[in-house]
Image: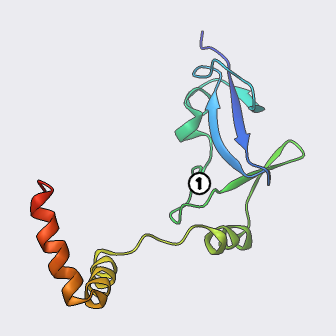
């Protein structure tokens, strides 16, 4: 006989589901909300099998929210707000090089000579 597994989710302050797991893997249920239970991989390995579209989409946005105990898909506009309000993307290698070149271009030649003379004495 197969075991019954309970599915739990964690949400953020906006009720967005930010994590999912099952009773098979959790030892501390503090901060988790039960949403379902059943038999089989969907429930036992909820992290990868429970949500049809996965927890996170291709843009790194969470796909689901918990509203009055019911799991619902987040709207396109909710996800777009995440993208717009999220951290800026990391600069590309070309952007990093351009920034460094810009900084080098602003260094006074005499100052650069001083730095070049100090660095060897520092054991670098």
Outermost residue, right direction? 68
Which residue is more in the foreground, 46 or 32?
Answer: 32
Few, some or many residues within 10 Å of mark 1 (<14, 14–19, 20+):
few
Quadrant (top left/top right/bottom left/bottom right) for the C terminus: bottom left
Horizontal relation, residue 16 to residue 124: left or right: right
Q: Is residue 79 above or below residue 73?
A: below
Please state the horizontal and vertical placement of residue 11, each as a whole percent of the image. Answer: 74, 44
Horizontal relation, residue 122 to residue 8: left or right: left
Which residue is more in the foreground, 3 or 110?
Answer: 110
Local secondary structure at mark 1: loop
Q: How is the image coloured?
A: rainbow
Q: Is residue 20 above or below residue 1?
A: below
* Residue that mark 1 sits on: 53
Q: Residue at x 9, y 62 (%)?
A: 120
Please state the horizontal and vertical placement of residue 45, each as a whole percent of the image. Answer: 55, 30
* Residue 2 location, quadrant: top right
Q: Residue at x 15, y 80 (%)?
A: 113
Q: Is residue 114 above or below residue 102?
A: above
* Residue 106 location, quadrant: bottom left
Q: Residue at x 39, y 74 (%)?
A: 91
Please state the horizontal and vertical placement of residue 22, each as a whole percent of the image. Answer: 63, 27
Quadrant (top left/top right/bottom left/bottom right) for the N terminus: top right
Q: Residue at x 23, y 82 (%)?
A: 111
Outermost residue, top direction? 1
Please state the horizontal and vertical placement of residue 116, each as a whole percent of the image. Answer: 13, 73
């Amino acid at each position: 006989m197969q075991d019954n597994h309970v599915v739990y989710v964690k949400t953020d302050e906006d009720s967005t589901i930010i994590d999912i797991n099952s009773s098979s893997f959790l030892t501390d249920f503090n901060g988790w909300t039960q949403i379902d239970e059943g038999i089989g991989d969907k429930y036992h390995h909820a992290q990868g099998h429970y949500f049809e579209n996965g927890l996170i989409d291709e843009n790194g946005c969470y796909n689901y929210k918990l509203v009055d105990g019911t799991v619902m898909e987040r709207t396109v506009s909710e996800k777009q707000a995440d993208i717009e309000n999220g951290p800026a993307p990391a600069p590309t290698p070309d952007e990093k090089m351009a920034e460094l070149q810009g900084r080098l271009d602003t260094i006074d030649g005499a100052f650069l000579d001083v730095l070049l003379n100090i660095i060897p004495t520092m054991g670098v």
